[in-house]
Image: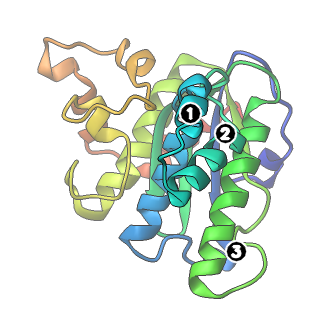
Amino acid sequence: MPSRNSNKQYLENSYYHIYNRGVEKRLIFSDQQDYGVFLYYLKEYLLPKNETDLKKKLSDPNISYKERAKILQLLRLNNFADEINLLAYCLMPNHFHFLIKQRSAQSIDKFMNSLCTRYTMYFNRKYKRVGGLYQDVYKAVNVVTDQQFVYLSKYIHKQALASKGDALQGQPSSYPEYLEIRKTDWVKPQEVLAYFSKTNPTLSYKAFVEKSDDLLEIQNIIIEDG
């Protein structure tokens, strides 16, 4: 991808392709636990935080020390449920892709800094390493056309499918949400799916994604205005 995409000028109520890879193209996910932790962090940042309920639990004198520590951590944790919509994602061994809609101009930057810093701390602690995990500051491309919008989701999901060719057995991604075989409250596929038919299989999102075409060809479409 062009390095110019690291120059981020964000607009409110806009869509972005966010991506990054490991330093020297090294792994950022080494096992299933790593994928699970990254997804768990996404869930905590993107689901609404009920502070009233958390404070009520905190006031219970019968909760354990471990439960109290967890609640305090959640209360301190940044939350982006009102700022970020995650429309699509794919996690690959040495990189990741997001399709994101942000509401305010600085939402993505705050979200990505929180997520990447937290995951780097986890990864370094687990693997007894120090230093940066990622190749550079994450990249961002403003999505400005309908063609970019739908083809970006296709590009993201085709990468996941390319590993094993199965929606459930490939790399972790939001594709099962798009096929409506899994529901995840913090993944928002509706805006993309609105472009496709729910009744005509040949015009469905599944047919669009699984059509035989080249990832490089799709990539040329999604970055043409980047």
Q: Secondary structure at mark 2?
A: helix
Instruction: Point out the tag, 1 or 3, that comes first from the N-terminus.
Output: 3
Residue 41 location (% of width, % of height): 54, 50
Residue 75, disc? 2
Q: Position of residue 121 (x, y in %)?
A: 68, 69
Give residue 8's mark. Answer: none
Label 1, residues with CA under 10 Å away: few <14, some 14-19, many ≥20: some
Residues under labels 1 and 3: Cα distance?
38 Å
**Label 3: few (<14), some (14–19) or many (≥20) C-alpha neighbours in 10 Å:** some
Of the residues under marks 2 and 1, which one precedes in the sequence? Answer: 1
Q: Which residue is mark 1?
A: 54
Colour pattern: rainbow
Query: Residue beneath label 3, please?
Result: 23
Point out residue 176 in the picture as x, y percentages from the top left corner: 26, 39
Tell me how far mark 2 sits from mark 3, CA to CA: 32 Å
Quadrant containing the N terminus in the rendered view: bottom right
Name the kind of residue labelled 3 in the image.
Val
* Residue at 28%, 31% in the rendered image: 183
Question: Splitting the image into 4 quarters, where does residue 85 fall?
Answer: top right
From the viewer's perspective, is residue 15 above or below residue 3? above
Quarter of the C terminus within the rendering: top right
Callout 3 secondary element: helix
Residue at 22%, 56% (x, y): give it.
Answer: 165
